[in-house]
Every structure is written in structure tokens, then in C-alpha cells.
Image: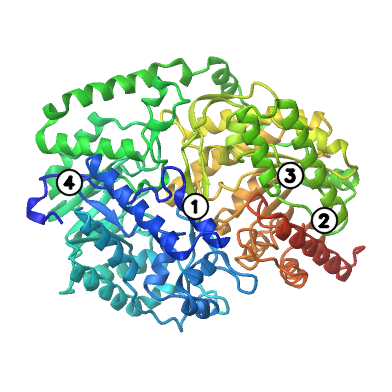
Amino acid sequence: MTTESATPAVRATVYGYPRQGQNRELKKAVEGYWKGRVTAEALRDTARALRADAWRQLTADGITEVPTGDFSYYDHVLDTSVMVGAVPARHRSAVTADPLDGYFAMARGTQDVAPLEMTKWFDTNYHYLVPELGPDTVFTADSTKQVTEFGEARALGHTARPVLVGPVTYLLLAKPAPGVADDFEPLTLLDRLLPVYARVLADLKAAGADWVQLDEPALVQDRTPAELNVAARTYRELGALTERPKLLVASYFDRLGEALPVLAKAPVEGLALDFTDRAAANLADLAAVGGLPGKRLVAGVVNGRNVWINDHQKSLATLGTLLGLADRVDVSASCSLLHVPLDAAVERDIDPQVRRWLAFARQKTAEIATLARGLAQGAGAITAELAANRADLASRATSPITRDPAVRARTGAITAADGRRAQPYADRAAAQRAHLALPLLPTTTIGSFPQTDELRVARADLRAGRIDTAGYEERIKGEIREVLSFQEKTGIDVLVHGEPERNDMVQYFAEQLTGYLATQHGWVQSYGTRCVRPPVLAGDISRPEPMTVRWTAYAQEQTTKPVKGMLTGPVTMLAWSFVRDDQPLGETARQVGLALRDEVNDLEAAGTSVIQVDEPALRETLPLRADGHADYLAWATESFRLTTSGVRPETQIHTHMCYAEFGDIVQAIDDLDADVISLEAARSHMQVATELAEHGYPREAGPGVWDIHSPRIPSAAEAAALLRKGLEAIPAERLWVNPDCGLKTRGWAETRASLEHLVEAAREVRAEVGGAA
């Protein structure tokens, strides 16, 4: 391994890298292991090869210090729980019998044992497994993964830096374990946890690690004085250890604010800070605390969360200022590159000029290396790169792709009335009950049904020319009829067509709207083996023609029961895309809202009486600091209402949200003015139903009674128990019965059984509360 003294004056580094491989090799290996087609050793071989290839790519692209420990089979927070021995009691026997199978049981559950709760990683679309802790939690150190992966990189000749989730963030992300009082504070376990981190650090030091990175993104959120005191004590104690590597404490996603002086004073050797636009205040704040004399600063000047090329001149100016504020300044992305696709160069279907505006992980590492060279040797050393960068930035700024005068005129003409339903909810509810004639505790699903192998084959056949469009559409019609038939036989009250024609809930719409670019290989991990291809929002948005009306109307022709129209809402269309950074998000959201409004109105005109506009990303996009909440929620809720406010009172508007912490946005949920909202609730044990009740939420709600992100099939008794818990907070006349989320990722066998149990539970509880069974 290269020694410290031999490293260049300015290092180029990253905090993490995409895990799945160029062709999602990890996803395929893990899912093959779950199905028994791939052995444990073959899975480990695939993982080792992917890690080695990532380090090789990073080094080839100019990164002089690579991260280790950021790789994960499923989730890095779950890996941290394993590292500190925080295995829930219900999973201990499985972990003891087979650590790998036990690990996946914690992530996904089994038929007999529920998984850990899953929620969003700060304001990203990445999901992590929530640690479960309690007064009886006993931590034990297991540094095997961290030491092994560091050793692999070292053996391959790389200068490497292990990356760990920091202890403060780990405890702040944790929740009380089932059966533990809700007011239990995981931070009270700090004294038990720090010796475990000390042991892991000592093991990494013994393995040859010179630096270890401890990620503390939770400190960029608003923190109480008590929490800041915990952070100060944590790094005072870790800094005082004698057997440890140098410590680099990293934050990202926003400014550190009041936590910056705490960490600046801590006896650690370095800080890694975000200096991109959303965290630009870190620069002035760092100067205000006197900088970091005698310490290393890793400057995150390249945006690790978006896909647009960097402004090199702007970054060099920031880096030049930082040179006077720290003993040494190194260059990095603002956060792990886990949140972007791997390589824009392979996107052959995107116009070459537009492709020059894009920077995925490989392009970002090259940008970092260029900036590091410019910082070390002066701007003259990168003259050609600076000129090319200026040309590409100018090309994008002046391109007609980015601006549509008609779209801008329409958004400029929006009035307050455009964002309000014409009738109050009470009047709409009466009209909808009369029109739909649904039973008490109506049952429905969230929208998608399993994407079968037959559907995937049909899409492949269409692309390859083995079938024509007419043949493909006949297969889609057959799938819709099968999905509707199953729902009718099962007794579901409000049906869906199953979305067999859709590839992804955002991509499907993006491909039909102007202003969006689709990628072929731009995969990003969402959770576990679930990868998505976020579209790229490059220009102004409009809807040239109807997107969903044909298939929704076809489904409605097959049944007398109501069939929901299914759309993805404007905030989620932004959150699960790579958005443009050249105008305010609220402006883009209004454009999308108006495009979707046209679709909603066309669905209603075609006879659709129930229309669901999904907004699962409303909470995840909430700014991390409270001072940004009001502005965000104002445009976010306005854009939803722009989408939905043009319909008649008897048309019932639904929305859906999942896998987030909803308590602090209940007022915003209310402000959406949807008639019905369905939410994830099974893993969190109906917590959201209580939060809605405490707020006095006046409309109808369906807190989910089936956790669809686990392969286990809930029994009717289990679903009924959750439903009864929901009834403690929401009256029966306003309570719906549904799964947590869409069923696209589930198989047909578990879908059939689970939905049959869900309907059985609804009938049982309906009879208990006086409705017809």
C-alpha cells in the first residue's frame, strides 16, 4: 500500500461508489442466492470481484484514496448493526445458524419472522434498515467485514480509507425495539456503543489503516443542545483513544450549522464537508470558526447526488478559499456516489451533445481528479479541461432543449383558483359515497401487480422485433383481464388494472413527457436488490398526448366495479428523477403538475371515477433543516393540487405514500386535499394512523396492513389485528384496507394468498363494526 509520505499534496477521493456493477451483477447474484441458484461462495466471489473492479476503476480515473466498507449486500446501516452486534432477538437464532441467511432475514423477513423497519436515508430515495434498540441492548464488536474489505484493497495496492456509519448518526437513526416504550432514547446507549467502535477502530489500525472515515450526516439536521453535547463527547472520547487510525468525520447533504464548531474543536484529524449549493453556508461557517488549523479538510465540491457536469471554475474558487482554512485540502464529491449511475459514456441513445452535459459516477471521479490536479498545480495545469468544461456549460445554458416558451407562459398564468377543489371535502365525500356505493372498510391495492416473466419476455420480444406492437398489446390486454378477474373473485372493492404496460412508476411517464431523457443503463440502488433508472429532467415539461387513458378505459370496460386511474405525482416525478439545477424546483414542479392535470382531466372524461396520484416522495424531499420546510411544502402541495383540482366532486382523488417518517408532514398531507390517502404502516405497527388521528386528519385513509417489501405472507388474523389497531385511531367510515405499497416486486403466489387474507380480514372486522361482511 502507498504510504502516507508518498501521497500527492492534494488527494482525490470519494466517500462511496455504486455497488451493483455495470450490469447489476450484484442484484442478479443476490437474487440467485435467495432462489437457491447461486451458492454462498459464488455470491461472495461476485462481491469480491465487484469491489476489486470498483477500486480499479476509481484508481484508473484518478482517485488516489479509495473507500472501503461502503460495499453492501443489502444496506450499509444494516451492516453497521451487524458490526456492533445489534441483532434483534427474533433474528439471533438465524444469524447464529448462518450469518448470511440471518443477515437477509433481518432485511427481508421470513414467513415466521418480521424484518427490520425500512425507511428513507435522509432526503434521498435510498432506503436503510432501521436499527432496533432498547434498554437491554448489548453491543459486541464484529469488525470482520470492515477489516476484510480494507485488506482486499490494500492487497491490490490501493491507498484505502475504511468508511463507517458514525456512532451518533447510528443512534439517531435507531428506533425503540418492539415492546420497548416509545419514549426510549437510543442515544442513552452511547456509553455501551463507544467501546465497540473503539474495538473496530483498533482492529482497523492493526490491519494497517492510516485513516478511517466516520459518517455523521445526522448532524446536518436541526439538533438539540443535548444531541450536540453527545456528538462532542463522542469525538472527545474516540479522539482520546491511543490505538486508532486518524479520524475523518464526514457530513453531507446540507450545512453542518451549529454542529460545525463542535466537530471543529473535536480531537480528530480531519473533517469532510459538503460545499455544493445546498450546503454552501459551510464555507462561511468554517471561516467563522477559524478554520481547521493542523487538520485535514476533504472538500465535497462535486455534486454526488445529481448528474450534471460540475462547474470547474466555481469549484476551484471554493477550493482556493479553503486552502487558507485547513492544514491540507483534498477534493471529493459532496457525498457517496451510490446515488448516481455508474457511467454516462455507455448511454449511446442520448444525443452526444447532451451526453456531454452529464456526469455519472465515473465522470464525477474524473472531475474530482481534475480539480485535485488544478488545486495542487494551479489552473494552468488543467487549461484544456477548463475550456472544455466552459464550452459544455454554455452549450447547456443556451440549448433550446431547456426552454419552451409555451410551457413557461402556461405556468405564468396559474391562479390561486387553479390549485383548489371547487367544493369542500364534506360535500365531495357525500357525492363520492353516493356515486361509488362502496362498503364500510373498502378494500383496494396500491396500483401495480406482479411483473411476471411473461411480461418481461413480451417487452424483450417487442424490442427484438419478434412480435409487433399489436401482438404486444394483446398480451397486455390478457394480463389486464387476468388481474381484474383475480381481484373480482377475491372480492376487492376498488380495482386496478395492474400496470402491466409500465416499466417504472416514474420512467413510464417521463418517456411520454417532453423535457425528460431516459437512460438505458443508468441504474441506481433504491433498496436491497431493487434498482431504478431515474430519468433525467433536462428541459421544460409538457404532455403531448394522453399517457394512461387507453389502458385504464380498457380495464373499466371489463368490469362494473370502479377501476382506479394511476398516476405518479409531480413531487415524486422530481424526487425520483435527476432534476435540472438551472431553475427552482418549485417552477419545475408546477410544470409537471400542469402536465398531469391534463391527464387527470382526460381520465375523468373517459369515465374514471377514482384517480390515484402517488406522492411517496413528499416526505423524503423535505429539506433536512426546518428553515426550508415552509417554502418546500408550499410548492410541493400546490403542485399536487394543480394536478388534481380540476375534477368534479364525485370523482374521488387518492394519493399514496410509503416508507418515510410521516409525523412531521401531517399538515402537508392534509393540505394536499386528497379524498383518500394510503400509507405504509405494517412495519411501523400503525404509527401513522395514530399520527393522523392526533392531527385531526378529516379525510379517508388506508394505513397498510401488508408489508409488501418482505416475502412473508401475512395471515388473515395478522391483517385483522393491524386493521383493529387502525380503527383505534381512524373511524370505520373513513378507513380503507390495502397493502403498504404496489405489488410489482412480489410474486403471484404470495400476492394471491396475501390479498385473499387481506379481504378476509376486512370482512371479519367489517362484521365486528356493524358493516355487511
Q: Quadrant of the C terminus?
A: bottom right
- Name the amino acid, label 3: Gly
Q: Which mark is residue 27?
A: 1
> Given this view, does label 1 or label 3 mark the residue nearer the observer?
1
Quick check: 518 left or right of 687? left
Q: Give the answer, above or below, for where 170 lies relative to 533.
A: below
> Given this view, does label 3 or label 2 mark the residue nearer the observer?
3
Name the residue beneath numbered marker 2: 442
Q: Position of residue 79 (x, y in %)?
A: 41, 65
Name the residue beneath numbered marker 4: 11
Quick check: 33 left or right of 463? left
x 31%, y 76%: residue: 196
* Secondary element at tag 3: loop
User: In terms of sequence position, does the residue under pointer 1 or pointer 3 come before the other?
Assistant: 1
Q: Give the answer, above or below, for where 124 lies relative to 319.
A: below
- Name the amino acid, label 2: Pro
Q: Which mark is residue 498?
A: 3
User: In terms of sequence position, does the residue under pointer 3 or pointer 2 come before the other?
Assistant: 2
User: In terms of sequence position, does the residue under pointer 4 or pointer 1 come before the other?
Assistant: 4
| Residue 303 location, quadrant | top left
Q: Is residue 549 visible?
A: no
